[in-house]
Amino acid sequence: MLVFFDTSAFVKRYISETGTDSVLAWCDQATEIGLSGIVLPEMISAFRRLHREARITDTQYRQLKSLLLADIEDAVLCDLTPSVLGHAISSLETNVLRGMDAIHIGSAVALQADVFISADKRQRDAAVRAGLRVEAV
């Protein structure tokens, strides 16, 4: 089963917060983890913000980054193709979304994900309208 995570969900794999247990359970169920290519810069941005706010140490930042890079090697990464962009634009035209959220939806549609995991309600609603099976974390 190809389980697609947007950044709001996938970050919970590394940072313990509400929804972490669900994300870990979905990771265990997945035969493949799908991610948009934008997840790496978004996740590094989140880790750096935590570091700037002194919520994680230098060592923790390096560990999180290492774990993320290792996980991404085994994931199905979706590039920004014309198909992804087309689906993203369609989502933007029919929903109130941020651009990056629409790219995650477009990526999941292009990968034909079996399930789309997100912590963002507005994005989940748009993903349902795009024809995806959606789960909240």
Image (cartoon, helix red, strand yellow):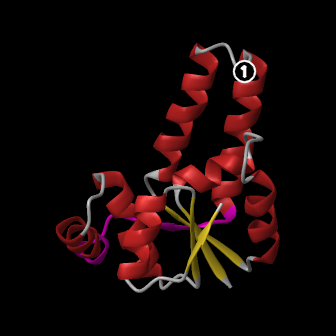
In this rendering, would 83 be left or right of 57?
left
94 left or right, relative to 18:
left
- Displayed quadrant of residue 63: top right
Q: Report the span colored magenta.
A: 74-86
In the depicted structure, whether residue 112 falls above or below residue 80: below
Q: Above or below — where is 59 with respect to 36?
A: above
Residue kind at label 1, given as amino acid type: Ile
Judged left or right of residue 98, residue 4 is right
- Relative to the observer, which residue lies in front, 115 or 78? 115
Image quadrant containing the C terminus? bottom right
| Residue for point 52% across, 59% down | 6
Residue at (36%, 81%) from the top-left corner?
A: 130
The percent coordinates of residue 115 (x first, y second) are 59, 79
The answer to if 81 sits in the magenta stretch is yes
Residue 92: name its quadrant: bottom left
58 lies left or right of 85: right
